């Protein structure tokens, strides 16, 4: 088992998985940061969303998704899903010891701690991510004096999937969630100076979120922070490819190739054709 | 096998299932229509939503959910999910021959055909329901001259789950979807006079939907139509209970009892405590 994974650690692709298409914003950042790498992306679309499911269920799904990707020739794994990162990483790391596995929580938390002057940081995510508290724990570990205000903003997910990322509805939903988060409380305490987008869908709503919070707030996109972390790591161990990628990206999904391609293309920022999406089964 | 199902057909409860909490609007209508019956409700919350998944996957999930309910003492089964009704009923009826099984599509389609004067009927639902075309087929079968305009209105699901069923955002989303559906096309053709709420979540947004379409449109709620159909059937075969229900309702879910209780209470119109929700596993 160990030997098998050591062999894989020398593989040629970077595996990326998410419950659906949201992680394609992370893949987009990864491809931009490492244009010579090959990627294999798995969307567990048959079982999405992870964000409203229990921690035990998501942890089990995450190990199954990782298992599917290690069957391919991958040299590292990116859990491009906040919910799976917050509850699934320990199980994946225990099961696949020889594999370098990155989540999106730690890089986002570190970037937020660096960006915040006042130490008051706001975090938004799905219900599962916020309830799980992983961002709160990661920020506190990196900056023990931090004050954290966290809130679920579940509707952003549906807006991003519907492509309603700009206009009156997106603006109204952003204000609905963020006005409360960035208004002074009754005690007149300070408001956050930094906002962590703790869900891979949320970069799609960056303009509406920026309009709602105003220009003075630092917005941390976990996708960008994660891509920078993976690049640093591969560079440090001498495993970063240069030149051109032979097969830049391969898409796997557990259901609905047509929808994956249609909605996913918006998230990736380039068209995906349904024929490019290979359906696989995780019932293993 | 047949014998087993015949015995069950004489059972005491009505089984109801949905991918999540949406079907609780159907349960609510069933309980109102048949106050002396006992119900057992299963929400397949570990695998929701069905609406964006492929037909094959939903059909398989539906048979598994039905299998779980026939293990209890049920006399009939209501598939309280539009997506599962549209693609799962044939498989369920084939597998459980002795069991009276009702979907929500046929009753809703029949009610719409009766309600419409002009024969121009609009149907809204999830992506899966609209793409599957089951309402369109059922309406056409009942009224061959009907003209049908169908559109997915996926965001209504998220709004209902978030409890954002009234106010500016709900109104804006309702107008976003429905203005186009009820405006005259360029050829000046007639607009629909009837609207079918083809998703169990949508009755939660009844006020916003009514405000968007105006007072002249008949709105058909499949939950109410289905409850009336089940009541008629049980009455016709002499299986309708009278008096008081001994155990009015029992809740099963495949994940997240706390969320099921919290969000589900709003859908059912009465509080559900997490302790009332029994977690079961459908991996059978």
Image (cartoon, coloured by chain):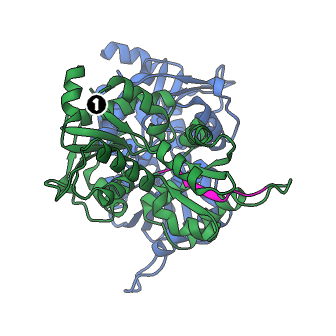
Chain colours: A green, B blue
Mark count: 1
Horizontal side of A123 relative to B167 (left or right) equals: left
Q: Residue at x 50, y 38 (%)?
A: B20
Residue at the farthest bottom position: B187
Residue corresponding to mark 1: A67
- Find residue A46 and report its image quarter: top left
Q: Position of residue B278 (x, y in %)?
A: 56, 22
Please name whichever residue, B163 or A151, is drawn nearer the observer in this view of the structure: A151
Horizontal side of B229 relative to A76 (left or right) equals: right
Residue at the farthest left position: A246
Horizontal side of A137 relative to B113 (left or right) equals: right
Element at label 1: helix
**Mostly what secondary structure, the magenta segment?**
loop
Disc 1: host chain: A
- Density class for disc 1 (Cα within 10 Å; few <14, some 14-19, many ≥20) is some
**Magenta stretch?**
A190-199
Horizontal side of A151 relative to A30 (left or right) equals: right
Q: Position of residue A240 (x, y in %)?
A: 25, 48
Please name whichever residue, A222 or B263, is drawn nearer the observer in this view of the structure: A222
The answer, for residue B212, to whether it is visible in the render is yes
Q: Is residue B219 magenta?
A: no
The answer, for residue B178, to whether it is visible in the render is no
Q: Position of residue B174 (x, y in %)?
A: 56, 66
Q: On the rendered image, what quadrant is the N terminus of chain A found in?
A: top left
Q: Residue at x 17, y 58 (%)?
A: A243
Q: Residue at x 49, y 68 (%)?
A: B177
Q: Is residue A107 above or below residue B265?
A: below
């Amino acid at each position: 088992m160990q030997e098998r994974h050591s062999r894989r650690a020398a593989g040629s692709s970077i595996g990326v998985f998410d419950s659906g298409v949201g992680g394609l914003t992370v893949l987009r950042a990864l491809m931009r940061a490492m244009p010579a790498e090959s990627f294999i992306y798995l969307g567990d679309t048959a079982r999405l969303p992870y964000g409203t499911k229990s921690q035990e269920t998501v942890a089990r799904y995450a190990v199954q998704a990782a298992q599917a990707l290690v069957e391919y020739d991958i040299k590292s794994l990116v859990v491009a899903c906040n919910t799976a990162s917050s509850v699934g990483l320990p199980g994946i790391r225990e099961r696949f010891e020889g594999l370098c596995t990155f989540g999106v929580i730690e890089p986002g938390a570190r970037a937020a701690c660096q960006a915040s002057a006042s130490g008051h940081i706001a975090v938004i995510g799905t219900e599962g991510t916020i309830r799980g508290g992983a961002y709160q724990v990661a920020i506190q570990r990196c900056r023990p004096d931090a004050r954290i205000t966290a809130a679920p903003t579940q509707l952003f997910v549906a807006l991003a999937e519907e492509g309603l990322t700009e206009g009156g509805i997106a603006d109204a939903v952003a204000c609905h969630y963020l006005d409360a988060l960035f208004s002074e409380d009754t005690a007149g305490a300070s408001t956050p100076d930094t906002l962590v987008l703790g869900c891979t869908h949320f970069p799609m709503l960056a303009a509406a979120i920026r309009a709602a919070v105003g220009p003075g707030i630092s917005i941390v996109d976990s996708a960008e922070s994660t891509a920078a972390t993976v690049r640093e790591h591969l560079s440090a161990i001498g495993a970063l490819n240069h030149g051109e990628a032979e097969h830049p990206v391969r898409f796997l999904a557990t259901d609905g190739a047509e929808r994956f391609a249609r909605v996913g293309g918006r998230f990736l920022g380039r068209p995906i054709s349904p024929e490019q999406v290979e359906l696989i089964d995780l019932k293993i």
